[in-house]
Amino acid sequence: MERNNFEEIDVREIFFLLLRKWYVVAACFIFVTVSTFLITSYYLTPIYRSEATLFLGKESGNVGGLSIGDIQLNNQLIADYRELLKSRTVAERVGEKLNVSPSKLLSNVDVRTVKDSRIFKISYEDSNPTLARDVVNELSNEIQELAADIIEVKNVMVVDEANMPNSPVKPNKKMNVAVAGLLGIVLGVGLILVLEFVDHTFKKPDEVERYLSLNVVGTIPKFKGGKRGKSKAKNRRELEKEHLKNLITINDPKAAATEAFRELRTNLHYINIDKEVKTMVVTSPSMGDGKSVTAANLAVTLAKSGKRVLIVDADLRKPKVHHYFGVKNNIGLTSILTDTKEDIKAKAIEKTEISNLDIITSGPVPPNPYEMLSSNKMQSFVEKVKGEYDIVIFDTPPVGQVTDAAILAGLADGTILVLACAGTRIDMAKRACKALEGVNANMIGAVLTKIDFRKTSYYGYSYSYQYD
């Protein structure tokens, strides 16, 4: 089933997504604000502004009060003075005196009037506060001279001369940092949403049903199992102890994950009402999805319900089942398929501490796993153990990477596809399903593992376990 172009947007899920990934927003906020503060403080050149206030009064020598005509004339003169101050002639004269280019002067000078008054202000911005003051004062002198020379009036008076500015007007640290903080938050939120959009992994059960058209028969929460990468441990007992942690159904019968495996067992029981499934393949699209842990714990749970269960490690490339149960891997499935002795199968079966549960490990890793699993002897073995046990579980390699699992899926009564929440790529899962469809495998359903219920908004309860 192809991905819909338009999907329902759950605002609640978005809220919980942002809530559980708050550290991304915090990191963006801190990075942007700190960067902006450092750039503003140490890299941007401070700009100073100096300003003078001028007044258009009554021309010296005239007596009497101002008439309406005088006031209207002064208002017009203010507009004339503004244009004169920003003229090229004035810029060249002032620039020559203070060694400032006319273009720079014109771009940094500003003349503004005070509304409903005869006051106007001249300001200039520059990185040199002394130069800013001198330019403004020189412009004040120029406009007084121009008023007398060009307009022939002497009514411009300086109210406040320009002083040396003490602090820069640009950059505004507080404003820059505040805006940067807001942008940092927006950036963090946007980054989370973009990463979520491009993350083509399964995150909830309904996505499995939507993309693969498979029923989700089990959802397994994270729990603390044996750490990956412990194969190089120097202490063999420590290594075995780490592997044994994966059997949560034995180590902690009251754990939430154990209860989830019981629910998986119950769901499988109801699925098998119409057609009995005695041989079951457990596989996954890729490595690290949790198929071996799922197969082992499912076998334990089924055995505890009174069924006679055999778990066979059919992963002849990277076997793990013997680690989880703490048994040796000297004789196993490869021995049965290659040895002609009649009693080899009996020797290969390992008894466990769990009543009704037997194990056949992989045995020595062969050079030709595909040929061994597709042999007639393998078919005979499947039929034989099928008659000896209530349920036989085959742990196989990832079907999305090698074809070994597809061979057994074609022989078994049913197949379970294990998917890791936020770990299994959707395209890999589709490829795995296509491979299983090619051998007419009976798909029982999918199991979604490694779910962190604490961070999942669509469940009403949470678990505190980790699944490694």
Image: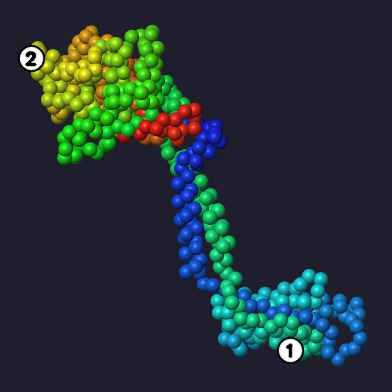
Farthest residue in the left direction? 341
Marks 2 and 1, how far apart in space? Answer: 121 Å
Relative to the observer, which residue lies in front, 365 or 152?
365
Quadrant of residue 244 within the rendered picture:
top left
Question: Would you place residue 99 above or below residue 75 in this image?
Answer: below
- Which quadrant does the N terminus fall into? top left
| Residue under pointer 2 | 341
Q: What element carries label 1?
A: helix
412 vs 54, left or right, is: left
Q: Which amino acid does label 2 sit on?
A: Lys
Q: Position of residue 349 (x, y in %)?
A: 16, 17
Please, is residue 385 above or below residue 120 in the view?
above
In the rendered image, which quarter contains the C terminus? top left
464 to the left or right of 357? right
**Circle 2: element type:** loop
Return the disc, 2 or 1, that comes first in the chain's sequence: 1
Nearer to us in this view, 114 or 265: 265
Residue 189 against residue 367 in the figure, above or below: below
Q: Mark 1 points at which residue?
A: 145
Q: Residue at x 66, y 86 (%)?
A: 138
